[in-house]
Image (tube, grey):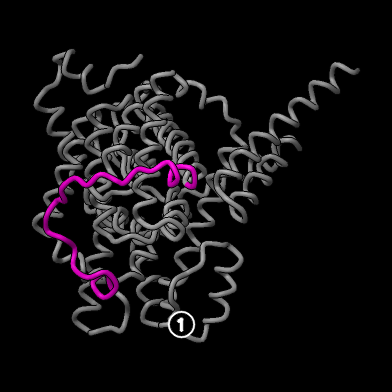
Amino acid sequence: MIKPKFLSLISDRNYSLSMFYADGLAGIIVGIVALPLAIAFAIASGVSPEKGIITAIIGGFIVSVLGGSKVQIAGPTGAFVVIVYGIVQKFGLEGLYLSTLLAGILLVILGLLRVGSLIKFIPLSVVVGFTSGIAVIIFSSQIKDFLGLNIGSVPPGFFSKWALYANHLNTINLYAVFISIGTIILILFWKRFNKKIPAPLVALVLSALAVSLFKLPVETIGSRFGEIPHHFPGPVFPKISINAIIHLIPSIITLTLLGGIESLLSAVVADGMIKGKHRPNMEFIAQGIANITSPIFGGIPVTGAIARTATNVNSGGRTPVAGIIHSVFLLLVMLFLGKWVKYIPLPCLAGILILVAYSMSERHSFIKLLKQSRSDMIVLLGTFVITVTVDLVWGILFGIFLSLLLHSSKIWLTNKK
């Protein structure tokens, strides 16, 4: 069905004050969780931190209003980090904005053609190998800030990145390491003491206070990027040219595939948590409109965020209103509290992202698939290796091709007998 869940909510007229209270509380909690992640993903993607907040505001609002899931929370995610970083390095921000906009248009077209329903046929071994590969890439991208290494820009290639780290191990900043490890320990154990206040927020506040009070020599958002703007930017449309589009085709396809797959994976996870059923084609359309809008206001690619969606559900969110409130909360933070963001130390964000990578690594599913059939193991490892060492799109395409090849071979051998 191509109809937003929010519209169904309005037409049902069963929304109560108690539901609004539950959604409002969940929206604020998710907003608090989303703030450090949005900033961290933006920085890891090679863009300024406010672009992550803008993306979370726009993506969260549009996908909640127009999406096919009751509880999906959208915004910048770790899966896009490597892709966005590569596009920015090669084509600049203009290339990123144009790629995102055109990917959004493709997602809308695919949704109208009802292609969203076909995503469920992608083999689990491909999905797990791909997701695990992204987790390794995110982990690798954070080593510089985690260790406080004194190096310039980090190359996108996996092996060249680690070679650069190895050559600069003598520049380790022990203060940065202490903050990074402290962030991880605090987040892992915080829930034992308090389940209401999100651990990442506590880590940000404490690390920022420590760096400011004791004048610790570590990089902060302010020292690298300056102060966060206190206003929401006006619309600026990317320059469109045939020549630019031709060069950006691989990037556009990557953003379209990854955005569609991750948003539907997140929606499926949410379905299991609330015993519901999302509308995949409507979700495609909503994600597409969000990606068309985000670059116009200086944002980066949008997709469904599994961790934030799960946080929304666990916090009591049950309708799209929670996602809308999450976006309004982030907008208010940007307008009135943005000046404090500059004090956040980058090693703290690195620690948060390393935990994100660990949580999305699909380690249990990875090990389980390794123990199943030989074909599952080959597809899993093939997808994982190509994703990490070559490219994300090639990882998906290689995994699907390998899966089809092995499946066809199995059928042929069976018929031959």
**Which residues fall within the magenta stretch?**
220-247
Give the image location of residue 54, x and y in percent.
23, 49
How many numbered circles are shown? 1
Give the image location of residue 335, x and y in percent.
10, 54
Q: Is residue 256 above or below residue 353?
A: above
Identify the residue at image location x=45%, y=45%: 243
Camera-nearest residue between 318 and 305: 305
Asked if residue 246 lies in the magenta stretch, the reply is yes
Q: Is residue 169 above or below residue 310?
A: below
Camera-nearest residue between 32 and 150: 150
Camera-nearest residue between 194 and 105: 105
Identify the residue at image location x=40%, y=23%: 111
> Which residue has dot 1 on it?
172
| Secondary-structure class at tag 1 | loop
Residue 395 sits in quarter: top right
Identify the residue at image location x=20%, y=35%: 322
Asked if residue 126 lies in the magenta stretch, the reply is no
